[in-house]
Image (cartoon, rainbow, N blue to C red):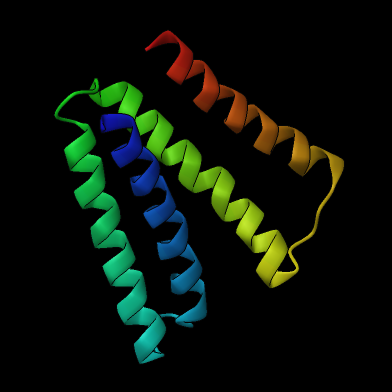
Amino acid sequence: MAWMFLVLAGMGEMLGMLFLKLSDGLSKLKPSIFALLSGSLSFYFLSLSLKDLPVGTAYGIWTGIGSAGTVILGILFFKEKVNTKRIFFVSCIIAGVVGLKLVS
């Protein structure tokens, strides 16, 4: 269950960042509320995963899922630029997340 909680925490992090962008500096009420709720759920699920996983591994994977996922969401929803370097470095983050999972 710890790994499922960690994936949910990472997805909450991604959604929190998406809503934070949509909130326009927390000036729009609904996206601001969703950003805070998503962030809170992310921390909640991260805390549940920490009952069974080492903190360094869990935090690394949580931030990796959040970082890589947010880049992908930015490309899909906000038309952020896609180039070879960006894809390479996001792939490095994903490889790091997979690596941490494999050695845990």
- Left or right: where 84 falls relative to 52: right
All told, the count of numbered labels is 0
Q: Is residue 29 above or below residue 5?
A: below
Q: Is residue 90 above or below residue 72?
A: above
**Which residue appears farthest toward the front when viewing the image?**
1
The quarter of the picture where the C terminus appears is top left
Identified at 66% across, 38% down, the residue is 90
The quarter of the picture where the N terminus appears is top left
Identified at 29% across, 70% down, the residue is 36
Identified at 59% across, 31% down, the residue is 94
Q: Determine the image quadrant of residue 6.
A: top left
Choose between 27 and 59: the one closer to the eye: 59
Q: Is residue 87 above or below residue 91?
A: below
Give x and y (percent) for residue 11.
Answer: 43, 52
Q: Determine the image quadrant of residue 25.
A: bottom left
**Which residue appears farthest toward the right when viewing the image?**
84
Give x and y (percent) for residue 17.
Answer: 46, 63
**Which residue appears farthest toward the top when viewing the image?**
103
